[in-house]
Image (spheres, rainbow, N blue to C red):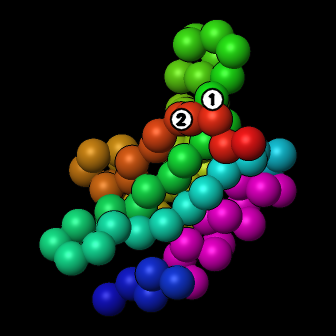
Amino acid sequence: MVDHRTETRKVKEALTQAGIKCRVSHGTGTASPWLHITIQEQEHPTATRALEGKVIKIAQSVTGRRGQSDGRINVHSRNLE
């Protein structure tokens, strides 16, 4: 079983080192395996999608998860300020 607290911390550290402003958490209840990442929304939608892709790749490399839905990684974008 994966230690969610450790996984959350490692993903947050990796994204912060990459210069990405974010919030990282896990789901609750039956959604507890899901890793939720919220990133700063960019001015252009294409830039936001590109950043989401970068975030997923970083999260995959840190956690060993395989993909977005299959690996249970959910990336949201919103204004974090």
> In the structure shown, which secondary structural element does the residue marked by tag 2 occupy?
strand
Between the C-alphas of marks 1 and 2, the distance is 5 Å
Q: Nearer the viewer, residue 6 or 43?
A: 43
Sequence-wise, the earlier of marks 1 and 2 is 1
**Residue pushed farthest front?**
81
Q: Main structural element of the magenta stretch: helix, strand or loop? A: helix
Count of marks placed on residues: 2
- Relative placement, left or right, of 4 versus 12 is left
What residue did someone put label 2 on?
77
Amino acid carrying label 1: it is: Glu
The correct choice, above or below, for 45 with respect to 63 in the image is above
Give the crowd class for mark 2: few <14, some 14-19, many >=20 residues within 10 Å.
some
Residue range highlighted in magenta? 6-17
Task: Verify CB contact (< 8 Å) between mark 1 and mark 2.
Answer: yes
In the image, residue 40 lies at what x, y percent? 66, 37
- State which quadrant residue 11 falls in: bottom right
Give the crowd class for mark 1: few <14, some 14-19, many >=20 residues within 10 Å.
some
Q: Write the residue at 69% across / 15% down.
A: 43
